[in-house]
Structures are given as structure tokens and as C-alpha cells.
Image: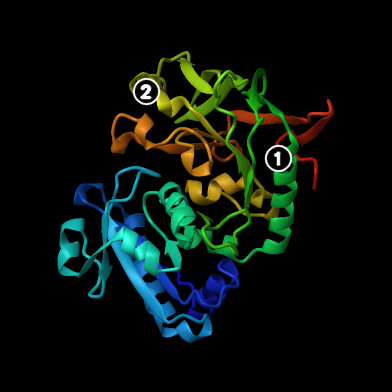
Amino acid sequence: MARLSEKELADLVRSVFPGHPEDRGLAVLVDVPRDPGRDNPGWKTRRAMAEDWRALLKKGAAAVPLDRVLLVAYPDVGSNNADLPADAFVVERGLPDVASGLEARGARTPFEALFRDIPLFLAPTEYSTTAPLKNAAAKQGFRAATMPGFSEKMVPALRLDYGEVGRRVAALKERLDRAEEAEVEFVKDGLEPHRMLFDLRFRTAHESGGRFPRKGTAGNLPSGEAYIVPFEGGPGEASRTRGELPVEIAGEVLVFAVEANRAVAVRPAATLGPAWRDEADRLRREPAYGNMAELGFGVLGDFGIGPVGEILLDEKLGLHVAFGRSDHFGGLVGPGDFSRPEEVVHLDRIYIPATQPRVAVFSVVFRYPDGTEEAIMADGRYRIF
């Protein structure tokens, strides 16, 4: 297993969580599979990495500086961005292979107590904790870097010039804040155009530059994106988000029909393959899944970073559109809009050649309140940097 060194980890924590010298406690947060049949090699490696990080940070605590370094584990929640369980375990005797063994390895502790007592969290989990930690951080005042699916392949993205990354992310946020609309034209197989109009009114964008200087904030690491929740509608005002959103899944290109910020139908591929059946069934079963939850612009692709097969990093490489939960970004759709906790999802579709080779971003145009327009992207490349 590739390892970050003791010095690299200390430098990382200082960079990610600058300032606030009173914040001298950190927890490495990790999920443990409830069902051993759902475990996988990447997850096993990540749990071992969490134990390694805790040991290295505890050894090098004076360099950060930290007074406490904890390893906190909990039974997995089964899907990305679902709510956390009520309790976790502060583990002292090594992680078990399955969640049923946690009781014997550490002290059961309510998450509420941990959030009150621990000011800093690193969360290299299998299932993303971004939504619940964002919401909890805003209430409790801690800071958290969420790292779902993190692996040693992502280490190069932790060594970038985050000053320049932050400059580009800030430039995108400023434009997203001003824009009323974003029109994206996609091209399927180099021939077939599809257009989406995203309603950006009444919303403020978020910037994620890989650093969390303010208390009460949480977000992804590695990072490098600006993103916004399209307007989902409100009293007396419908969302203008509409159009056709092509998504390549397992080699099939499906086209989602979007009205008032919701995918309401999916046009089948010619073969009526399994991806179409799965997505059509999911829309019928969970209408909240069809919510256009995020329009995001990653910048790390311009720094030579390539995809690793994990959304945590890959979404930071270019344009992405998310389905489902949006409340953790200031939107309206949350866990209560899904039928059960296992169905709660915030799922990014990433538009770069490595992840969707049959669907290209032809252009992105922002429209501003004064009637002007600006080409943000053309032929998959940014035009503003």
C-alpha cells in the first residue's frame, strides 16, 4: 500500500485546516461493512490506510499541532450521502472486518458528542459522508474533509498548487453567482446534439478549493471545483431547468428528459439495454432521484490529473451534473424525499472522455442579468483561464 509519510500527513492537515490554533483534536472517520459479502479490496485498503493515518498523525501530533488523534468507525450506511447512524465507536484495538465486531474494539459514542468535542475530521470512507457532515458541521462548528473512495492513486492530487486551483475555482464561483442561466450543449457520438438549460436564479455557488479555513464547513478532498444547485422551484415560481441530458452508462447513451429541474423520463437506447431498464425503474421508484441536484465545474484536468475511477477525484476534472439529494448544498431535496434511507443518493455524472467517451461537452454559455453572455467552455476546454 502506498503511504503518505508522517511529514506529508502533518503538512496536509495544516494546509487543509489552516488557522484556529485552538482546534487541536482530529478524528479519522471510517465506515466498516455490515455485510462481509459487500466488502471489496479498495475498501479493505482504505480501512488499513485509516489506521495508518491515525498512527502517523498520533506520532507526529506535535508538528500539526494536535493534542488528540482518534480513529472513529461506524457501520456502513449502504449508500452515498445517506444520514449517519446515531452512534460510532472510538476504536483503540484495531478495526474489525465487519461492523458487528466494533462493540468489542472500542467505546460506543454518539455522533452528536463527537461533533461537539472533535474540531477536525478526515473521512476516508467507502460511502460518501459529504452531505451529513456538511449539515452537521454547519450546526456544530467543526471542519471536515470528506474523502470517499480515496486511494493511493489520488495522492498526486494532494500535491498541486492549490493557490492556482483556488484562483480558478473562485473565478468560476464568481460567474456562477452572477449568472441566471447556463446552457450546455452536448454531442453524442460526434453527431447528435442535446441541449440543457440550467436555471441558476436565486442560488449562490459553492467553491471547493481543498482548504477549509472557516469553522462549520465540510467538503471533499482532493478538491478543485465550483458548483451550484440549480433553482428547484418555489412558491409561485417554477424552475426553468429543462432539456435533454445525455448520460453514458456502461456503454449505453441514455437521454433524460428534464422538465422543471426533474428528470421525468429516460429515452431508451436502441438496444433497450440493462442501463435503460435500471434508470427508468429508478425514476419510477424514486422520483427524487431525478432532481438536478448540482451543476459542477472541476478544474484539476488542466493540471495533468487523470481519472482514477472514483467520483471523489474524477468529478474535479471537468463538468459534472448530479442527480438526487441537494439539501447539503442549500437545495430542497433531502432524505425525507426518498422512500427509505438506502435509496438516498447524490450521484454525479462526469463529462470527460475517460468516463463518458460517447458524450462530449460542445459548449457551455452563461447568461447574465444584463443580457450579456459568456462562453465558459468550448470543445470540452475552459475558455476563461
Does residue 288 appear to the left or right of 181 in the view shown?
Answer: left
The reply to whether residue 44 is visible in this rendering is no
Does residue 346 appear to the left or right of 157 in the view shown?
Answer: left
Name the residue type under label 2: Pro
- To which residue does mark 1 refer? 177
- Residue 150 found in image quarter: bottom left
Give above or below for 52 relative to 173: below
Give above or below for 269 relative to 167: above
Q: Position of residue 319 (x, y in %)?
A: 63, 38
Q: As rendered, which of 75 and 235 lies closer to the eye?
A: 235
For the point 84% across and 28% down, which residue is it?
370
- Residue 110 found in image quarter: bottom left
Name the residue type under label 1: Asp
Q: Secondary structure at mark 1?
A: helix
Mark seen at residue 274:
2
For the point 54% across and 75% down, which residue is it?
8
